[in-house]
Image: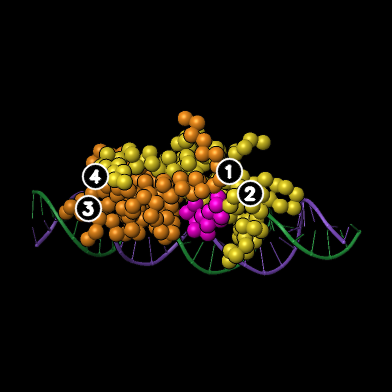
Chain colours: A yellow, B orange, C green, D purple
DNA sequence: TCGACATTTCGACAACTATCGAATTGATTA
DNA sequence: TAATCAATTCGATAGTTGTCGAAATGTCGA
């Protein structure tokens, strides 16, 4: 019933457990899956599975598998609307992951944190 | 001869190619490997392999394998000093990865980008 | 109700990978 | 030089995972 109760999404910043972190990183580590997430993220509104599948050289079964991984990791939200399953990015999770990496990099003294910009 | 020429480290922010991004995410996705990277990152100076191995329940061969993955991904720098190989975090790469994820999250319209702080 | 469509589940298979012990390479010291 | 320590390389193995076609589930419209 919660908004994101899979691996524990919608975390408040870098409050990712080790398990959550691993699930998210594994989900992102597959190029095809990352591409799927990109498609969902860059669309202006929620998209269906078949829309997401369009022009992707993978079988529907494979997409379904990837979507489950993304959902389990808490990265996407799946709203079941009759025939269609509408996909959208679960807010906060990507940010939490980014923040975790940023924090690790900041923990390193030699890293000059050069925002040379 | 370059500072970080493995997968192409030391990137200028979110200038990660797809291959670099995948290599980095795969390297981070293994919990044990992430732990190894954390040890290297949190130490005040460069550490040797055996120092990194201390108290880790893995064989030296396994650590060596993980280190190669981290180095290939551009996440760490390995300086060979005689008997010892000194490990340190390659600056910029974790930040680039974090920025890539942040950018993806920002590309999503529904993501309210709530920095409720 | 029946057919068409969307999505998932079910094996199955191939590729990849984390892990290890043993052997090897390389450097230091006695 | 020989012994020792650090680290890697070499198979080998077990577990994981991305992929698919086929079958099943679920939903809608005619």
The label number, if any, that marks residue A46 in the structure image: 2
Q: Which residue is mark 1?
A: B110
Residue A99 quadrant = top left
Q: Earlier in the sequence, mark 3 or mark 1?
A: 3
Q: Chain of mark 1?
A: B
Q: Nearer the viewer, residue B33 or B11?
A: B11
Q: CA distance from mark 2 to mark 3?
A: 48 Å
Q: What residue sits right under mark 4 in the picture?
A: B46
User: SS class of the residue under badge 4?
Assistant: loop
User: Is label 1 in contact with label 2 (beta carbons under 8 Å)?
Assistant: yes
Nearer to us: label 3 or label 1 = 1
Q: Nearer the viewer, mark 2 or mark 3?
A: 2
Name the secondary structure under disc 2.
loop
Q: Which residue is mark 3?
A: B79
Which callout, 4 or 1, points to the residue nearer the camera?
1
The picture places residue A90, in percent across and down from the top left corner, at: 57, 43
Between A7 and B116, the one lying in front of the other is B116
**Is there one chain holding both mark 3 and mark 1?**
yes
Q: Position of residue B5 (x, y in %)?
A: 29, 59
């Amino acid at each position: 019933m919660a908004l994101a109760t899979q691996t524990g999404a919608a975390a408040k910043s870098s409050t990712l457990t080790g398990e959550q972190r691993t699930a998210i990183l594994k989900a992102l580590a597959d190029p095809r899956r990352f591409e799927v997430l990109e498609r969902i993220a860059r669309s202006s509104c929620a998209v269906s599975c078949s829309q997401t599948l369009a022009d992707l050289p993978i079988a529907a079964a494979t997409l379904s598998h990837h979507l489950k991984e993304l959902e389990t990791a808490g990265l996407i939200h799946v709203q079941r609307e009759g025939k269609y399953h509408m996909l959208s990015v679960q807010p906060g999770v990507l940010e939490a992951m980014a923040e975790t990496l940023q924090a690790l990099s900041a923990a390193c003294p030699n890293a000059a944190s050069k925002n040379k910009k």
